[in-house]
Image: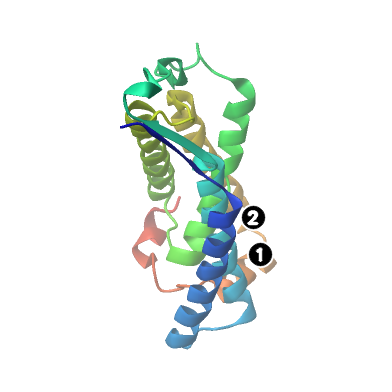
Amino acid sequence: MSGQLTVPALPILIPLGVALMVAAALVLHRRGALTPGRLGVAWAAGWYAVAVLGATFLPLHLAWGPATGEPELFRILPVPILSMRVGDFILNIAMTVPLAALLHLVAGVRSRRRVVLTGFLLSAAIESAQLLLLLFLHGNRWADVNDLIANTLGAWLGWLAFRRLLRVPAVARTAARWSVNPRAGVADRAVAR
């Protein structure tokens, strides 16, 4: 039995983003931490997650069964640099630059190691899922080792940029005031440099 399915982007992403906004407001209210700044940070983090999901998976075209033929193995790029698509590499760097600021403000993650590791693991999960969808459901995305490198590099560059921004006293005060979870990551402060 063969079949096809197209998972559209907007009918998934918009309700998901709105649901995350509502959930963020409820969680902050329940904690007694609901302020406009914290709500804005939580909403930005939610829409960032929605944007990453949309950029990496949607729309998604799937097919299965004997009539679909072989998977498009040319979409698997396991060799770094040689198979690099420069435009995609730059976009993948840009995609994870905000990660450090959001991890700091939402989860209290301050250490370079944890930010870069989170960027790497997030990218590895995305690339692995894209690979599995490509191999088993004839997905239309690419599984590219260069994306893994670019996303990890973007997380590191984002950490560097955010650390520099935090040297500005007004930015540091605003970050402290808008932090969704100001107590999280206290242990990270010692290794943040």
Q: Is residue 34 left or right of residue 127?
A: right
103 shown above or below 53: below
Identify the secondary structure beneath mark 2.
helix
Crowding around mark 2 (Cα neighbors within 10 Å: few <14, some 14 to 19, many 20+) is: some
- The quarter of the displayed image where residue 125 is located: top left
User: Residue 16 at x, y = what percent?
Assistant: 52, 62
Q: CA distance from mark 2 to mark 1?
A: 6 Å
Q: Earlier in the sequence, mark 2 or mark 1?
A: 2
Q: Are marks 2 and 1 in contact (CB under 8 Å)?
A: yes
User: Residue 171 at x, y = what percent?
Assistant: 66, 64
179 shown above or below 67: below
Residue that lies at the very extreme toward the top in this rendered image = 82
User: Residue 3 at x, y = what percent?
Assistant: 39, 35
49 shown above or below 31: above
Residue that lies at the very extreme toward the front in this rendered image = 1
The amino acid at mark 2 is Leu
For residue 165, the mark is 2
Q: Is residue 4 left or right of residue 16?
A: left
Identify the secondary structure beneath mark 1.
helix
Residue sitting nearer the eye, 7 or 56? 7
Residue sitting nearer the eye, 95 or 13? 13
Say which residue appears at 55% left-offset and 47% top-offset: 8
User: How many marks on residues?
Assistant: 2
Q: Is residue 79 left or right of residue 9?
A: left
Residue that numbered label 1 is attached to: 171
Which quarter of the image is occupied by the N terminus? top left
The amino acid at mark 1 is Val
